[in-house]
Image (cartoon, rainbow, N blue to C red):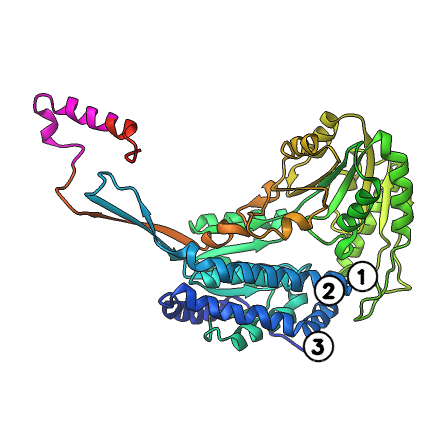
Amino acid sequence: MGNVPLCGEREVNVAIRRARKAAAAWVSVPPDRRAKVFERFHDLVLDRQDEILDIVQLETGKARPHAFEEVADVAVTTGYYAARAPSLLNQKRRRGLVPGLTRVTEVRVPHGVVGVIAPWNYPLSLAATDSVPALLAGNAVVLKPDLQTTHTALWIAERLQEAGLPDDLFVVVSGTGPEAGAALVDAADYVSFTGSTATGRTVGARAARRLIGASLELGGKNAMIVRGDADLARAVDGALRGAFTNAGQLCIAIERLYVHRSLHDAFLDRFVARTAALRLGTGLDWGYDIGSLASAAQLEKVSEHVRDAISKGATVRAGGRGRPDIGPFYFEPTVLTGVTPEMKVCAEETFGPVVALRPFETDEEAIALANDSPYGLNASVWGRDRRATLALARRLEAGTVNVNDAYIAAWGSVDAPMGGTKDSGVGRRHGSEGLLKYTESRSVAEQRGPAVALGGAWLSRPGARRVAAALLRATRRIPGLR
């Protein structure tokens, strides 16, 4: 596809300087005028989708339907923020100390230059949907994609420029994490990172030393619970999508599957048969269900998790092996049973097309099993009894919980925040939080009458403290003063 430069600290610092200069002008552009750029970008992504689908497939090996999920996500998220950013960024009136005398306004101020570090698994979606709200908020963005997916990032840059984004507001630096990534964290004013928990800890610590903010979406070991009253056919369909979309290389993919004992055998039979029927293959067309893993390293990790599980007594119900006859990094969609805590696949994130299935007896047991993880990114619950299913869902320790869906319901609802708990990260994308995190709040308080002093020599006067206390009590009791 072509060559890209290997950027280091010097190149990153040059990019930061260019971006900072561009941001100084961009911040004065009203949000509604900024939004026009992203309305055009939204249309360009859809109009030019065939070329970016090809690029994403060539760089990642994923199946075309899964590449299209990225196009859809960028369109939905960009359209949402282009419509909502102007109102979210408007200054807000806040209640002053003394109504009528103290006037307070909250304004949103962009950080300046946002460093976005994007992963290889969703190179279009995660690079664009983190950058768009940062730009709309008035920042410049310096994006460091994974080296494997740099051409996707450059395509984004070209489309933003075509949409009318001023020069140097969106700069791509291609390089390694230890070199370019570290330099970006050391120079940006805010950092948005998506990747592994181990690397996220390093990024977060590095940002904390500089006292800058960071949003970190990290790993997951996501659970799906199928209650005894669930629609069996729908739950099997959901498990297939949840476990095997993008060959399982999705931070919100299902890796742990808990099925009520009354449905377990029927579910297992259907799920195994449907898994075995999935079509693996290469090609820039719509004819395959599952694409390739992204690299030799991913193939080795997935293979090792499965080998370790088999050696310790797990049973392979479907898949379980690489497919070099199809492509160098292909691995069959795999269903395991008999997985126990000493196996790597039980608790560690596999990030591949492997899911472990286990029965449960009660909702309480299912909740305990699902929550028994250091991760808390996504979860899924299936059942017909809406009240009971929602009650179960609300007790799961995850940033997003989908009811009668695997992940799209929450991921696609961009008006609602999305992110991790526990070792799955801090911060949120989507919703108002996904935009406002790229700003600081500034409170401007204007005193329009006599200054109010809550301390000072006047408190020594007889009865002054009683008067002050009475006024403070009044602010709690009088409507409009609370």
As measured in the structure, the alpha-carbon distance from the residue carrying label 2 to the one carrying label 1 is 9 Å
Q: Which residue does the numbered mark 1 point to in the structure image? A: 291
Q: Identify the image quadrant of the C terminus.
A: top left
CB under 8 Å between callouts 2 and 1?
A: yes
Reply above or below: 235 against 88: above
Report the front residue among 207 and 276: 276
Q: Please give left or right for residue 130 compared with residue 247 in the image.
A: left
Span colored in magenta: 453-473
Rendered residue at 65%/74% (across/down): 48
Rendered residue at 66%/77% (across/down): 3
Reply above or below: 162 against 123: below
Q: Which residue does the numbered mark 3 point to in the structure image? A: 1
Q: Which residue does the numbered mark 2 point to in the structure image? A: 60
The quarter of the picture where residue 125 lies is bottom right
The quarter of the picture where residue 173 lies is bottom right
Q: Position of residue 203 (x, y in %)?
A: 54, 51
Asked if the stretch drawn in magenta spans residue 454, the answer is yes
Q: Secondary structure at mark 3?
A: loop
Reply above or below: 46 against 458: below
Report the front residue among 473 and 255: 473
Q: Secondary structure at mark 1?
A: loop
Which residue type carries mark 2? Thr
CB under 8 Å between callouts 3 and 2?
A: no
For marks 2 and 1, the one nearer the N-term is: 2
As measured in the structure, the alpha-carbon distance from the residue carrying label 3 to the one carrying label 2 is 13 Å
Which residue type carries mark 1? Gly
Q: Position of residue 397 (x, y in %)?
A: 63, 35
Are there few (<14), some (14-19), or many (20+) residues within 10 Å of tag 1?
A: many
Query: Which residue sits furthest left?
Result: 461
Q: Looking at the magenta stretch, what is its main secondary structure?
A: helix
